[in-house]
Structure formats: C-alpha cells, structure tokens
Image (tube, grey):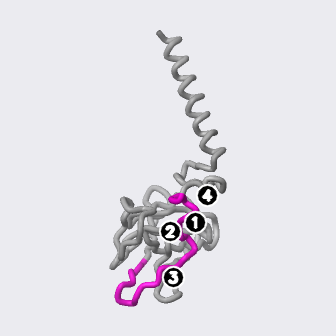
Amino acid sequence: MSRSLALFAIGTLFGATAGFLTAASYGVTLDGHDHGEHLASTHSDTHHDMKHDELLAVSQEQAPELALSLIADPMSGWNLQIETTKFFFAPQNASKPHIDGEGHAHIYINGEKVARHYSNWYHIAQLPSGDNTIKVSLNSNDHRQFAIGDKPIEQSLIIKVD
C-alpha cells in the first residue's frame, strides 16, 4: 500500500511538473497570463489583445477619484489603502468589455508593476532601504487606464525605509 502511494505521489509530482513545463513552453505563466507571441494570432481574446498602454478618457463628472495611504503593519511590512469614489473593483469582469466606473488597480513599486489588484487593501511585505515610490493607477475591465483627457488617473506616495 505505501509503495502504491509513493508511486502515486511521484507520478503526481512529475505530471504537475510536466504540465507546468508544457504551459511555460507555450508562454503561459503562473500569473494567469499568456505571454506566448505565437498564441496571440490564434486566440482573439488573449492577453495581447488587451489595451494596457491605452488611456480611457472620461469626463471630469464621471472620473473616478483615487487616494492612497500607507500604514505600517504591526507584524511586518506595510498596508496600502486604496480609496476610490465613482469606482468599483470588479474582478468578476476582468478582461471583459468596459463598464463605466469599474475595473481594477495596477500597483507599481519603484516603477515596476507588482500587481493587478481588485480591492481597497494591499499588503507590501518589504521594501528596499531608501526612498520608495508606490504608485497606483485605476484601469477599466479591458485594461485601459482611466484618464481625464490625456492625464492618467493615478496617485503616488513616497516612503523612506531605513
């Protein structure tokens, strides 16, 4: 019985590894995005068809508002609070067509995108020593960044870590 269980566990491990390697060879990563150039031409709804670099201009009256605060976590790191008005996080509609006033946030630390995020709180486990810039942008379901005219709706704050 234990030999069968061990063989099952080994088979499961190799199967999972083979599945991961196969997925990676096609450009699929654990972040759920398809990064394979060769797949973009065969799938019209792939990650490459999203509008990450485009702005979605909205009127001043419709424009979401964004405010950030960073609070030291009592255990470790920091908790980033993302406060919005006229905007709702909508993970159920990710990568679907635009709906006014809903979508997700992109979180950047020191210019590097670290997350696509769907709620008002985000835990930052650690930051390097020195000044760190935390930036958050608001994005539509179809990944365009909300903007007023050509000015993206985003906020930044700087935290100094000793």
Front residue (pair 129, 124):
124
Between disc 1 and disc 4, the foreground one is 4
Q: Quadrant of residue 104?
A: bottom left
Indicate yes or no whether the magenta region holds residue 149.
Answer: no
Residue placed under numbered mark 3 in the picture: 152
Nearest to N terminus: mark 4 or mark 3: 4
The reply to whether discs 2 and 4 touch (Cβ–Cβ < 8 Å) is: no
- Dot 1 amino acid type: Lys
Q: Is 68 left, or right, of 127 in this rendering?
A: left
Residue 26 — which label? Answer: none
Residue placed under numbered mark 2 in the picture: 106
Q: CA distance from mark 2 to mark 1?
A: 7 Å
Percent across and percent down for residue 138 are 45, 74
Residue placed under numbered mark 4 in the picture: 41
For this orientation, the residue located farthest to the front is: 42
Between disc 2 and disc 4, the foreground one is 4
Residue 113 — which label? Answer: 1
Image: magenta residue range: 44-67
* Residue appearing at x 39%, y 84% in the figure: 63
Nearest to N terminus: mark 1 or mark 3: 1
The reply to whether discs 2 and 1 touch (Cβ–Cβ < 8 Å) is: yes
* Residue appearing at x 40%, y 64% in the figure: 121
Nearest to N terminus: mark 2 or mark 1: 2
**Local SS, label 2:** strand
Q: CA distance from mark 1 to mark 3?
A: 16 Å
Q: CA distance from mark 2 to mark 4?
A: 26 Å
Percent across and percent down for residue 31 are 54, 52
